[in-house]
Image (spheres, rainbow, N blue to C red):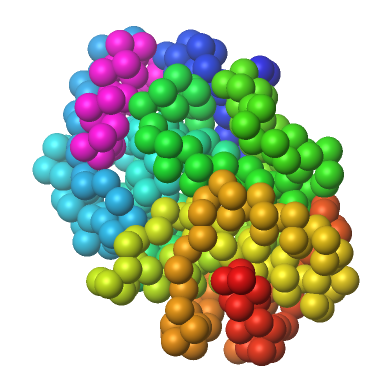
Amino acid sequence: MESITTNNCTIHFNEVCYDALNKHLKEKNFSKIFILVDENTHTYCLPFFIEKVETDVVIEIIEIESGEINKTIDTCVGVWNTLSDLDADRKSLLINIGGGVITDLGGFVACTFKRGIAYINVPTSLLAMVDASVGGKTGVDLGHLKNQIGVISNPDLVLIDTKYLDTLPQNQMRSGLAEMLKHGLITGESYWNKFTDLSKLSLDDLDELIYESVIIKKNVVEEDPYENGRRKTLNFGHTLGHAIESYFLSNPKKTTLLHGEAIAVGMVLACYISTELTGFPKEKTLEIKALFTNYYGKVSIDESEYATIIELLKYDKKNNHGNINFVLLESIGNTKMDCLVDDKFIIDAFKFYDI
């Protein structure tokens, strides 16, 4: 798979990653190298990665706790303090090895510490490979509200080695697949149809599909790096999906949903609303619902919880002038942005999902 360059960032794949990394380390002459991990990637990914690194520069390991619940400013303060204590300077490098929480938070830490140090993302989850580490979005949650604080800043490199997926639990693989399914729905039938029978996909197929997903996101982000237009389409299913994810994160009686699990629900809801408002074929909505619920199961959302989830929509980052803006489908591959949706259609969508 050929390397991809976009917005001053180069994305490398599999074995090419480490030659590119070592060349970069040699050329840039960093003063110190810091590697950010969580307890899982420290155990399962770091030893493999360290074996591949060729440098005489001092390497320090910084570990944070895993999980969306730790994607906070408080965690950033801890990492910033550790960098300071370990004498990081503006010629230091931060390498983020982990899933979306690590790449989002680590990128934010890097581009704010001393007004910006270089960083590299090494995504180890499927979600991070196809979504979180590509496009320069960094940031943290504000309480239980998703990604409210952050900046757009590209890493020097993204190193996607699918060997790390061998360490990933099945539910995390499913979570990442949701973003790939989204790419299919917003891009076109040719990519979407590759997922219609998930049981037939092999690991070799997965490598190619990851590459295609990265290309899809790269093309969108290059055209609209700051989300003023087409990049909004990458939020299909995320308006309600993020609200559901935030609600489950904040409610102690609920089991926390992985990002992809919440977005899968959000996409089914968005397809229903699309059928009602933008002419998306009803039979397609039924097919998509069947595919998603068969693969992800059904998330239990009681009718008494609808209003609380709808209230959380006001925090969505696509909103402006007090309007909640949805991305909807007219057909697979054809999106309509900045759609206003009455609460009635949202409630009906929840009821459709629950049937």
Residue 219 lies, in percent from the top left, at 74, 42
Q: Quadrant of the N terminus?
A: top right
For residue 130, above or below residue 288: above
- Residue 113 located within the stretch drawn in magenta: no
Q: Is residue 53 above or below residue 201?
A: above
Q: Quadrant of residue 350?
A: bottom right
Q: To which quarter of the image does residue 201 belong?
A: top right
Residue 27 in magenta stretch: yes
Q: Residue at x 42, y 36 (%)?
A: 170
* Residue 115 visible in this rendered orientation of the protein: no
Residue 293 on image: x %, y %? 58, 55
Nearer the observer, 171 or 124 = 171
Visible residue check, residue 265? yes
- Point out the image quarter for the C terminus: bottom right
Image side of residue 88 versus residue 201, left or right: left
Q: Position of residue 68 (x, y in %)?
A: 33, 56
At which x and y percent is residue 163? Answer: 45, 19
Read off the magenta span: 25-53
Q: Residue at x 30, y 51 (%)?
A: 67
Residue 89 as seen in the image, left or right of residue 263:
left
Residue in the image at 84% along x and 73% along y: 278
**The quadrant where residue 149 appears:** bottom left
Q: Nearer the viewer, residue 44 or 4?
A: 44
Task: Work out whether residue 125 or residue 93 is closer to the camera in this orientation and state it.
Answer: 125
Q: Does residue 167 appear left or right of residue 239 in this picture? A: left
Pick out the residue farthest to the front. Answer: 355
At horizontal 61% and vertical 78% (from top left) the residue drawn is 351
Q: Answer left or right for 246 relative to 280.
A: left
